[in-house]
């Protein structure tokens, strides 16, 4: 699983039928460094049925795990938002808390 920040949306009017009605988001993976979440090098396009907004931190899953999400059974997806993050604690410290 990946911690990522939603940095935008992707609009595609011509797409596979499995993506009809699905929201696509642009997610920038983050890593924990010196007790803080910092941007990593990976940016992904992910399906989002949870309604994540720009600037929110989310948990993504990829690969065959992404296709196991109930709403993705008929979608050829590789990345899916599976959680909206409220709080992250690491090494006994608060790293992130949604305001």
Image (cartoon, helix red, strand yellow):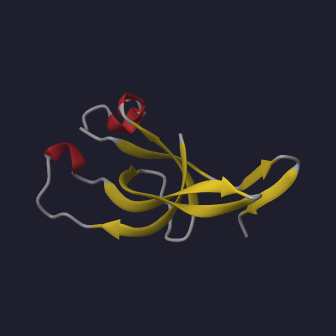
Which quadrant of the figure contains the C terminus? bottom right
In percent of the image, x 74 and y 52: which residue is there? 88
In the image, residue 5 above or below residue 85 = below
Asked whether 3 or 84 is in front, the reply is 3
The picture places residue 91, in percent across and down from the top left corner, at 84, 46
Residue farthest toward the right in the current orientation of the protein: 92
Asked whether 19 or 8 is in front, the reply is 8
The picture places residue 52, in percent across and down from the top left corner, at 50, 61
In the image, residue 48 above or below residue 65 = below
The picture places residue 80, in percent across and down from the top left corner, at 41, 45
Residue farthest toward the front in the current orientation of the protein: 34
In percent of the image, x 66 and y 61: which residue is there? 37
Res 57 → quadrant:
bottom right
Q: Is residue 49 left or right of residue 59?
A: left
In percent of the image, x 42 and y 30: which residue is there? 65
In the image, residue 2 above or below residue 13 = above
In percent of the image, x 41 and y 32: which residue is there? 70
Residue farthest toward the left in the current orientation of the protein: 14
Q: Is residue 47 left or right of residue 34?
A: left
Q: Is residue 60 left or right of residue 46?
A: right
């Amino acid at each position: 699983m990946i911690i990522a920040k939603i940095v935008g949306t992707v609009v595609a009017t011509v797409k596979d039928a499995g993506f009809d009605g699905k929201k696509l988001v642009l997610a920038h993976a983050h890593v924990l460094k010196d007790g803080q979440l910092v941007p990593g090098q990976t940016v992904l396009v992910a399906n989002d049925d949870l309604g994540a907004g720009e600037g929110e931190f989310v948990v993504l899953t990829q690969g065959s795990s992404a296709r196991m999400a109930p709403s993705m059974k008929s979608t050829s997806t590789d990345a899916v938002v599976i959680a909206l993050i409220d709080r992250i604690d690491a090494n006994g410290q608060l790293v992130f808390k949604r305001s």
